[in-house]
Amino acid sequence: TTPLLIDTDPGVDDALALLMAFNDPRHSVVGLTVAAGNVGLRHTVANALKLCEVAGVDVPVFAGCASPLLHPARDAAYVHGQDGFGDVGYAPAVRGAEAEHAALAILRLSHEHAGQLLLVALGPLTNIALALRLDPTLPQRIARIVVMGGAVSAHGNITAAAEFNIAFDPEAAHIVFSAFPKIELVDWEAVIAHGLLHTQVDEWLRADSPRARFYDDISRQTRAWSAERRGERWHSADALAMAYALAPGGTLKLVERPVVVELDGRHTRGATVVDWQRQMGGHDNAAILMRYEQVRFERMIQAALAAC
Ligand code: BDR
Ligand code: CA
């Protein structure tokens, strides 16, 4: 099995992605490194621990950065709930986080699984950027890095031009995009193109399993929010990134181009600028997912929710 390290800020869609990872027999999750993002670090860590408990998995959880590298945080509690998990008032997990900082755990695990590790980033890139500053040789030991983030045609979700994970900590994203030779990028526009029918999701959530019941609870608020604003399809960003990361086959389309992160723009800070015409002289540091097999994506979600 392939060792899988997930950097995350749970977050309702993070939670679905984690359930998909736990359910994949070809990957073993070696750790969850957690950052602030959707909500503050205290909540994202508690949510990661709770999800592991509900799923019955014993994956170590490492707390990481509580704020972006430079600028104050702007969270997404209005989407995910004040606690990031729909404010259902769940009982906290019994187990606590490990003592080791997430950035140090990333480095240690990259050594333990050198050349094999699949790193999937589902939140702001603060922990990974910090790890890179501590040890710039990190990319040499990573087999693949998949990032959920960005908006490749500047169709943002948190601002007109920027996607949440990148806009939350643009400096961290800049460090990560400058360091890895090839980032497999699942951006917000791919997510929009792979929406899930609410009626279908409702059906999957009726599965008789503790995972489905818990997920039904914590996602109810955000699904209603989304149905009201965005219509009949739900956009589960981190779930799409995880589906692609776990099963990068079938009829998919990837396009390789140089991508840089805008740090200064007045209206565009945090935008991912794709050099479509290759005019800026950079190398193709991103493989952008343009199309993924919808049936494959949906089967993975259904199976992850039904699993016991
Ligand atoms: C991303 O932002 C977060 O709110 C989600 O968890 C996802 O990682 C989508 O823009
Ligand atoms: Ca996330």
Image (cartoon, grey):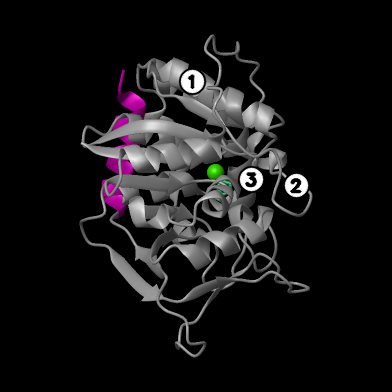
Residue 17 in sight here:
no
Does the segment drawn in magenta span residue 297? yes
Label 1 Cα neighbours within 10 Å, binned few <14 / some 14-19 / many ≥20: some
What residue lies at 70% left-to-right and 34% top-to-bottom? 40
Q: Position of residue 297 (x, y in %)?
A: 32, 47
How far is mark 3 from mark 1, CA to CA? 22 Å
Amino acid type, residue under disc 1 in the picture: Phe
Q: Residues within 10 Å of mark 2 (few under 14, many from 20)?
A: some
Q: Answer with left or right where residue 133 lies relative to residue 140.
A: right
Q: Which residue is mark 3?
A: 228
The residue wearing badge 1 is 214
Q: Position of residue 66 (x, y in %)?
A: 69, 38
Q: Is residue 233 magenta?
A: no
| Residue at figure coordinates x 36%, y 28% from the top left | 305
Task: Indicate which quadrant contains ligand 2.
Answer: top right
Q: Secondary structure at mark 3?
A: helix
Side (left or right) of 275 relative to 242: right
**For numbered disc 2, what is the local secondary structure?**
loop
Identify residue type, mark 2: Ala
Q: Quadrant of residue 246?
A: top left
Instruction: Choose mark 3 or mark 1, whichever is in front.
Output: 1
Q: State the quadrant of the C terminus.
A: top left
Magenta extent: 294-308
The disc, 3 or 2, on the residue closer to the chain's N-terminal end is 2
| Ligand 1 within 8 Å, label 3 CB | no
